Image (cartoon, helix red, strand yellow):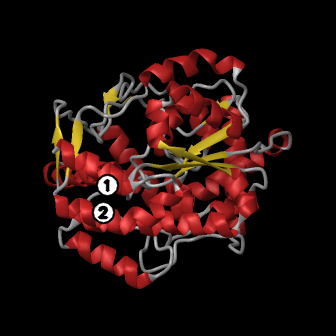
């Protein structure tokens, strides 16, 4: 499989202060967790009036529209999210957000292209997936493929739960907003646990037709492999901030059936990325579909958002997202309209699969994809006709 790209290759670099700051905080994480708990004690009276109101988790496999949705919703006046700057101090959100704006550092003040080369530009104030660092600290084996990754209603980790709830309260307090929204990709296997912590939590589950989805993920795998050769520092910092989705060192979720996961890993390591990604797509989304079918109460809390609907039927899809999240529409009218014009299918690359690869993807993903409303065979014929 190959992808053809039409956009000029963009370069991204990690500012040195950002790199060393993240490394230092990561190395001293236990100390900063203790300081985070001290911060909570100092703010106890103010936090008594705070609550975590209907947190929203944007989850699913990457490259399905999660980032652009987070950026869009972060512009809602009621919404609080993590930002790129929070990677520098994820454990003390109140103190950090009071201090950091006063630090005379110019890094990422102006927009820079993301490492993904996907048309999205970011600054240090852009919304981003920030809480995975906390999950990794309190669940040390959460990104170990030999361990079961699913956290469900029976999971219990009181130190994490206390720290995490207080963390979200402090983030809301310092930002003056009360609706927390997270791009939490791996929370696709933690929804039942999060529902136990927050009985009113909402989930936006993102999915994309497997042919385009696999092509996009492989494109990222190749970018990661290229960057690791030219600037391994970038890959290191990505992993330290909780991102393990792409490239030679990616970590896959273990949702059961370890023999299947081992075969998916073997195929990936052997360079058969198309088949590996197809089987992983079916592996993860098959688990999710089964979980939703077996847990109707959880299913009611999940809004399935298809990438194709987000791009081609934007306004109704945005409205459905807002309704499910319980966000007021009036103060969001201009943003809603702007994003309805901004959202579009990528024009800077397209998937190029052989007939055999398309047949394999169809065979492997077709059954699970049908649950989400996709006819993979029809999509495969259309892609084949265009190559």
In the orientation shown, which residue stands out farthest toward the top?
334
Q: Position of residue 174 (x, y in %)?
A: 68, 33
Mark closer to the chain start, 1 or 2: 1
Task: Look at the image and tell me whether residue 281 can be seen.
Answer: no
Which label number is shown at residue 356? none
Whether label 1 touches label 2, CB < 8 Å: yes
Q: Give the residue pinned by disc 1.
A: 214
Say which of 50 and 359 sits in front: 359
Determine whether the residue tagged by mark 1 lies in a helix, strand or loop: helix
Which residue occupies 16% across, 57% down?
354
Q: Quadrant of the N terminus?
A: bottom left
Say which of 95 and 300 sits in front: 300
Say which of 28 and 116 sits in front: 116
Determine whether the residue tagged by mark 2 lies in a helix, strand or loop: helix
Q: Which one is closest to the eye, mark 1 or mark 2? A: 2
Q: Position of residue 32 (x, y in %)?
A: 56, 54
Q: Reply above or below: 216 against 280.
A: above
Check disc 1: other Cα within 10 Å, few if <14, some if 14-19, many if 20+: many
Q: Reply above or below: 286 against 148.
A: above
Q: Give the residue pinned by disc 2.
A: 361
Distance from the alpha carbon under mark 1 to that under mark 2: 9 Å
Q: Reply above or below: 118 against 384.
A: above
């Amino acid at each position: 499989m190959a992808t053809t790209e039409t956009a000029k290759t963009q370069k991204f670099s990690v500012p040195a202060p950002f790199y060393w700051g993240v490394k230092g905080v990561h190395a001293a994480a236990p100390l900063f967790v203790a300081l985070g708990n001290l911060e909570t004690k100092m703010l106890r009276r103010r936090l008594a009036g705070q609550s975590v109101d209907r947190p929203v988790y944007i989850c699913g496999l990457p490259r399905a529209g999660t980032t652009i949705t987070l950026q869009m919703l972060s512009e809602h006046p009621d919404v609080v999210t993590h930002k790129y700057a929070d990677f520098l101090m994820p454990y003390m959100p109140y103190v950090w957000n009071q201090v950091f704006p006063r630090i005379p550092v110019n890094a990422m003040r102006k927009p820079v292209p993301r490492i993904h080369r996907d048309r999205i530009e970011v600054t240090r104030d852009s919304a981003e997936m920030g809480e995975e660092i906390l999950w990794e600290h309190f669940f040390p084996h959460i990104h170990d493929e030999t361990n079961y990754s699913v956290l469900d209603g029976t999971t219990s980790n009181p130190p994490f739960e206390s720290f995490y709830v207080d963390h979200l309260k402090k983030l809301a307090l310092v930002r003056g907003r009360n609706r927390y929204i997270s791009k939490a990709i791996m929370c696709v296997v933690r929804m039942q646990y999060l529902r136990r912590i927050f009985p009113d939590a909402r989930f936006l589950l993102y999915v994309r037709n497997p042919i385009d989805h696999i092509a996009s993920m492989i494109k990222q795998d190749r970018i990661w492999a290229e960057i690791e050769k030219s600037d391994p520092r970038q890959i290191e910092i990505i992993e330290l901030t909780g991102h393990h989705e792409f490239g030679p060192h990616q970590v896959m979720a273990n949702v059961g059936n370890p023999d299947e996961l081992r075969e998916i890993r073997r195929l990936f390591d052997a360079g058969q990325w198309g088949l590996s990604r197809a089987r992983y797509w079916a592996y993860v989304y098959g688990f999710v579909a089964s979980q939703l079918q077996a847990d109707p109460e959880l299913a009611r809390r999940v809004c399935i958002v298809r990438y194709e609907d987000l791009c081609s039927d934007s306004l109704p899809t945005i409205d459905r997202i807002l309704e499910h999240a319980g966000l007021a529409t009036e103060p969001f009218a201009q943003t809603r309209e702007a994003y309805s014009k901004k959202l579009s299918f990528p024009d800077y690359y397209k998937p190029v699969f052989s007939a055999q690869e398309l047949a394999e993807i169809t065979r492997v993903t077709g059954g699970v994809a049908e649950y989400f409303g996709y006819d993979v065979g029809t999509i495969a014929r259309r892609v084949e006709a265009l190559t």
